[in-house]
Amino acid sequence: MAFMTDRKRVTGLGASHTGTGAFWTMTVTSVALLILTPLFVFIFGPLLGEPHAEVIATLSRPFPAIVTGLMIVVGLYHFRLGVRVMIEDYAHGFAREAWIIVMTIASYALMAAGLFAVAKIAL
């Protein structure tokens, strides 16, 4: 054990042996959201209060549609990871597993609905 490196001692630690992977995934989605959020705000912000036709015309262009789709997917994936950590910290027993399943299904359902809406507008 004395010959192990620091990295070897840390890799795979945690109750599920995936703590490092979950941390890196949250970090990567956070950085992606740092880039996507201002883009989304600058695209979507001016559309607030505009007529329906103008909103459809703007979101029909490729760049706004791609940014909106990425924001939906990355944002809800980040949400799913964060909610899972919160549930693992505060729920116990069967309730923990049930809430993780419910929130995973809800986040993927919202992703699918959001991407369907963006695709319907863009195409």
Image (cartoon, rainbow, N blue to C red):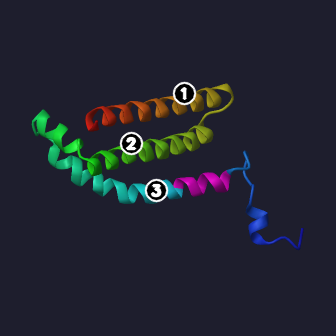
Residue displayed at 63% across by 31% down: 96
Above or below, 24 relative to 52? below
Over which residues does the magenta segment extend? 19-26
In whole angstroms, how far apart are the C-alphas of marks 3 and 1? 23 Å
Which label number is shown at residue 72?
A: 2
**Residue 69 placement (x, y as % from top left):** 36, 43
Would you call the spot at circle 1 few (<14 residues within 10 Å), some (14-19), or many (20 or more)? few
As helix, strand or loop, the secondary structure at mark 1 comes to helix
Above or below, 109 relative to 4? above
**Residue 49 placement (x, y as % from top left):** 11, 39
In the picture of the structure, the residue carrying the numbered disc 3 is 30
Asked if residue 35 lies left or right of residue 7, the reply is: left
Q: Amino acid at mark 1?
A: Val
Q: Earlier in the sequence, mark 3 or mark 1?
A: 3
Asked if residue 113 lies left or right of residue 7, the reply is: left
Q: Amino acid at mark 2?
A: Ile
Asked if residue 113 lies left or right of residue 3, the reply is: left
Q: Amino acid at mark 3?
A: Ser
Residue displayed at 73% across by 46% down: 15
Residue displayed at 55% across by 42% down: 86
**Residue 3 placement (x, y as % from top left):** 88, 73
As helix, strand or loop, the secondary structure at mark 2 comes to helix
Q: How many marks?
A: 3
